[in-house]
Image: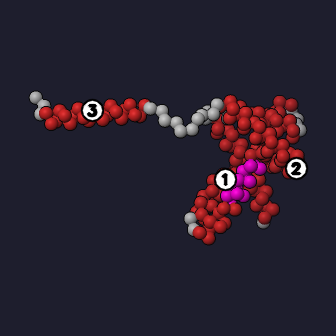
Amino acid sequence: MVPPRTRTALLSLLGVLALAGTAAAQNFESAPQISPVFRAGGSFLIDLVVGGILVAAAPAYTRDAIAEIRDDPGGSFLWGLGVGIGGVIVLVLLAITIIGLLVAIPGFLALVLLSIVGGAVSTVLLGSLVTGVASGGSPSLGVSLVVGALVAAVLSLVPILGSVILFVVDMLGLGVVGRNLYRAWS
């Protein structure tokens, strides 16, 4: 026979474990979820607006950036990783000190601006790859932008593979923009 104190302790432990299982099964979401279709539509519109600004303001730069990515995709990708990941690490390390924070804040703003321009370049690149393969030629920037925004929106709906593809394409765009900025600065 089990002593009463041991039995009480075991039953209490069993009750706590049962309560923990019930609590773990609860779904506490603090923010409402947005439909993936609405997120893809928002992504499509943002890509169209930002890419449209880039194509309208600097069509020659956009064509040159796409040609540079096609000539050296590996180098562009590595530059994208260096600017994106390396830049964030350097800026976080700078932000630790007060004096470094004065450099880190404009640095983060510059990195966001580089990411926006790189994302626009990558959207046009994605569209030019799809339409160039389909037509066998060099499509216009406007057509490439619309197709690229549509392809990016569809890829954003694909759980893992779509995210990986979009990450690689975005790193290509960020890399070529970062490399061009470095060349202009040097």
Badge count: 3
User: Is the residue 100 above or below the residue 54 in the image?
Assistant: below
- Quick one: label 3, few (<14), some, or many (20+) residues within 10 Å? few
Mark 3 falls on what kind of element? helix
Q: Which mark is residue 137?
A: none
The residue that appears at 89% across and 38% down in the rendered structure is 140
What's the CA distance linking mark 1 and mark 3? 50 Å
- Examine the rendering and report whether any part of residue 152 can be seen: no
Q: Image quadrant for the N terminus?
A: top left
Mark 2 falls on what kind of element? helix
Q: Quadrant of residue 18?
A: top left
Foreground: 40 or 161? 40
Mark 1 falls on what kind of element? helix
Q: Which residue is mark 2?
A: 57
Q: Which residue is mark 3?
A: 14
Q: Which residue is mark 1?
A: 84
- Quick one: label 1, few (<14), some, or many (20+) residues within 10 Å? many
Foreground: 135 or 166? 166
What's the CA distance linking mark 1 and mark 2? 24 Å
Q: Considering the whole magenta stretch, tell me its main secondary structure.
A: helix
Which span is picked out in magenta? 107-118
Pointers 1 and 2 in contact (C-beta within 8 Å): no
- Quick one: label 2, few (<14), some, or many (20+) residues within 10 Å? few
The residue that appears at 69% across and 40% down in the rendered structure is 166
Residue 106 location (% of width, % of height): 69, 62
Foreground: 155 or 2? 2
Pointers 1 and 3 in contact (C-beta within 8 Å): no
The type of residue carrying mark 2 is Ala
Q: Quadrant of residue 86?
A: bottom right
Residue 125 location (% of width, % of height): 79, 41
Q: Earlier in the sequence, mark 1 or mark 2?
A: 2
